[in-house]
Amino acid sequence: MTAANQSASGVPPRPLVVSRVFPAPRELVFRAWSAAEHLQRWFCPAGYTVPEAKIDFRVGGAFDICMRSTDGKDNWIKGRYAEILPPSRLVIDMNALGDQNKPLFRAYTVVTFAEEHGGTRLEVTQSYTLYEPLAALSIQGAPQGWSQTLDRLQQELERMKNTVLPNRSVVHATFSIERIYEASCAQVFKALTDPAAKAKWFTGGNGYSLLAREMDVRPGGREMVKGRWDSGLESTFEATYHDVLPDERLVYAYEMYLDERKISVSLTTFELKASGAGTHLRMTEQGAFLDGYDDAGSREQGSKFLLDALGNSLI
């Protein structure tokens, strides 16, 4: 038996990093790692099933998975959740076991969940410690195994989106952003209310394709912008205008959707005041984030990005 963490060649196995963007909210992707009912449907490569899973979703809790091959051989992974930070990070310390529950190798697994292009980027990093040299062959096949496993995760997420009921909740948040533009109040108000002018800056940026846009700025008028991200997720902005004072004030309420899921309802106010030869703009948003959607400050950051883009459109 060679020393731990060395293959037959004497070279320690290199860490593995795999990532994929899923067209699903990160709360849903995170949930898929938290319960046996989900993990049994996806946590194995092609040609395997998961007949047993013992999951105790807490720090120190069990992460025990049995992968059964088509010839009926059971391959156990037994580990513990070492870190849980919903919905952004998991650390699982696991061992792959051989005959008589003998450890073959350790896979220290760090999983991160980040919002990206309207969906979720999942990244898995595994660092290995070898206990048996022949287990190096299993580690060499890990990239293909993870690719097939993430294919199954995609299928499970689609099933979960259609069947898992959300936890009903509302989280309130308010923020204000101020900008000074070297343009008149009339020019800034036009950028906010003229369809052609607003189309220059009110967009999703890289990875976003516009599907539809409508705009009717008047009390009772409506606005709709719908687009699709590279992940396949569609986002929809639907607004109703309540107060329109040319060159002074704009107030509207809007809903945001990811696919068919309503994630928030907000009230937004723009106030414009002359500042020397330019304009002082103050944007205030009061939002209600719905049914487990974790904004984590992304709405405020996105609004700052858009207001900077508005300023660039005035140049």
Image (cartoon, rainbow, N blue to C red):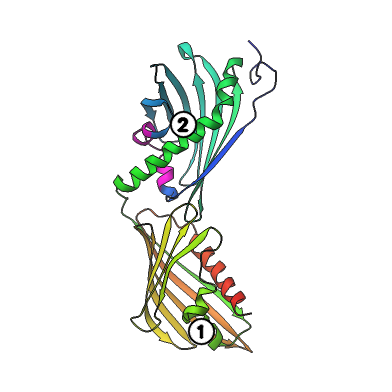
Which SS class for mark 2?
A: loop
Q: Position of residue 225 (x, y in %)?
A: 42, 69
C-alpha span from label 1 to label 2: 57 Å
Q: Position of residue 78 (x, y in %)?
A: 46, 24
Kind of residue indicated by mark 1:
Lys
Residue at 40 percent of width and 46 percent of height:
28
Q: Position of residue 48 (x, y in %)?
A: 41, 25
Residue at 53 percent of width and 31 percent of height:
144
Question: Is residue 19 shown left or right of residue 87?
Answer: right
Which SS class for mark 1?
A: helix
Residue at 37 percent of width and 79 percent of height:
241
Position of 315 relative to 80 (above/below)? below
Which sits in the foreground, 58 or 73?
Answer: 73
To which residue does mark 1 refer? 190
Position of 103 relative to 253 (above/below)? above
Residue 286 lies in what quarter of the image? bottom left
Circle 1 crowding by C-alpha within 10 Å: few under 14, some 14–19, many from 20: some
Residue 77: numbered disc = none
To which residue does mark 2 refer? 60
Q: Main secondary structure of the magenta part?
A: helix
Span of residues in magenta: 28-41
Kind of residue indicated by mark 2:
Gly
